[in-house]
Amino acid sequence: MNRTVQKLRSHVFICTNERMPNDPRGCCKAKGSEDLLNLFNKAVHDRHLSTEIRVQKAGCLDTCESGPTLVVYPDTIWYGKVRPEDIAEIIESHLIGGIPVERLRIAGK
Ligand code: FES
């Protein structure tokens, strides 16, 4: 088994799904999710947490109306309408401190 995987503390999946501009469901990519993914990865890297926290892009997470959305495993905590300025709080409070950021959680998830 891969040693890096064994040491992971959290796995963050960020939806980067793209739809046609006229699709009524919209999509996370149009709401800036690719920038969010890159900035999240940079923030994790800058904190030297890359071996403990993995951030990856995901397809549609079926929470499109709340986009950009992400989910953190193994906690199964869902966040919606995440902005770049929320990244530090998610990392510090949740991924390091173990306290989810309630104001960003998707209701009912
Ligand atoms: S397009 Fe991102 S959750 Fe559906």
Image (cartoon, rainbow, N blue to C red):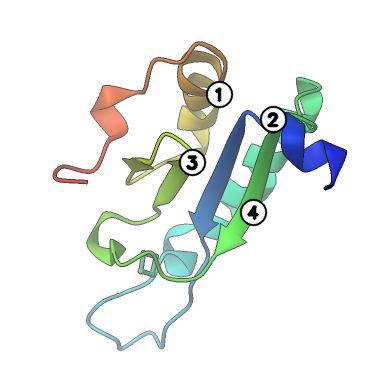
Earlier in the chain: of badge 2 and badge 1, it is 2
Which dot marks residue 17?
none
Question: Which residue has dot 1 on it?
Answer: 91
> Residue 65 at x, y = what percent?
23, 62
Q: Residue at x 46, y 30 (%)?
A: 86
Ligand 1 neighbours mark 1 (CB distance < 8 Å): no
Earlier in the chain: of badge 3 and badge 2, it is 2
- Up/down of 13 relative to 75, above or below: below
* Kind of residue at badge 4: Gln
Q: Residue at x 61, y 50 (%)?
A: 37
Observer-nearest residue: 44 or 28? 44
Question: Which residue has dot 3 on it?
Answer: 73
Residue extending farthest left: 108
* Kind of residue at badge 3: Tyr
Q: CB under 8 Å between callouts 2 and 1? A: yes
- Up/down of 62 relative to 43, above or below: below
